[in-house]
Amino acid sequence: MKQRYGRLRRKLTLFLILCIAAGSMTVGHIFFNEGKTTGGVSEHSVFLPVIMYHSVVEKGEVGDYVIHAETFEQDMIWLKDHGYETVFIEDIINYVYTGKALPKKPVMITFDDGMKNNMNTAYKVMEKYEAKGVYSVVGSYCDSGYPYMDWNELAEFAKYPFAEIQNHSYDLHGLGNRKGSTRMQEEGFCEYITGFASDTSKMQIMLEEKAGVTAACYTYPFGLVSQETYPVLEDLGFKVSLTCIEKGNMISKGDESCLYRLNRYNRSADESTEGFMRRITSE
């Protein structure tokens, strides 16, 4: 662990050195070009809809980010009845990097923030239908605990067979002066890049130390993407990142860039299972 922490510290130092060396170069064009898309259609591609859930409750009020367990179960039944099979982040990485086959009709089920009810209420349904779930957690929320999983619960949850844990930042999940992990107005480029890298690295280290997890995916808080973070995530070893843009994805063998900034559909309580699923599974 100390060795890995040392490598991450050296990466942060390198970011700062490059910032200083860049001097008067145009901010925003030091490390990156115009960015990447989610890939193109080919005979070696598969369509992947990604669903974003947050809170799943047994009873009580529902809304944009809260649905009833009964609705959630109906969603899982619909997917199963229509031939869809759930996949992990690891599965799509293996497909792109090594050509390992994906199901003919893959779908990814994701949960943001690390709500405690993801571990019990939602997971009971996932386990019942043998459905894989990708859970992106916020480190500072784990520090606080209820209504979020604490670190001990997360460590236990990480061992569950149908759960995969990913990085949702340590402490950038807010909409104050900084909107998610984006750059604040008047914030210097170097200050921003080193701050983002530090927060992301801290969460990676805590996931490893406290939950035995090495996250391969960065889930942008609120889906607010900053182009300046692209090379940082790649350099820190992330192979996938998730947004909140409501579109499908085309995943292509050999095209590593298609795994960055994957689109996701938010599942609110406003639509029926039939209406929602028909909408998101249309290529």
Image (spheres, rainbow, N blue to C red):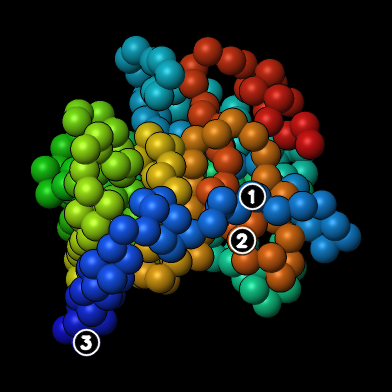
118 vs 75, left or right, is: left
Residue under the point 36% across and 51% down: 27
Residue 236 lies in quadrant: bottom left
Figure disc tally: 3
For marks 1 and 3, the one nearer the N-term is 3
Q: How far separated are the C-alphas under marks 2 and 1? A: 7 Å
Q: Which mark is residue 3?
A: 3
Residue under the point 69% across and 65% down: 255
Q: Amino acid at mark 2?
A: Ser
Q: Is residue 189 visible?
A: yes
Q: Which residue is mark 1?
A: 37
Q: Is residue 201 above or below residue 82?
A: below
* Residue lying at the far right of the rendered structure: 43
Q: Amino acid at mark 1?
A: Thr
* Residue lying at the far bottom of the rendered structure: 3
Dot in front, 1 or 3? 1
Q: Which mark is residue 257?
A: 2
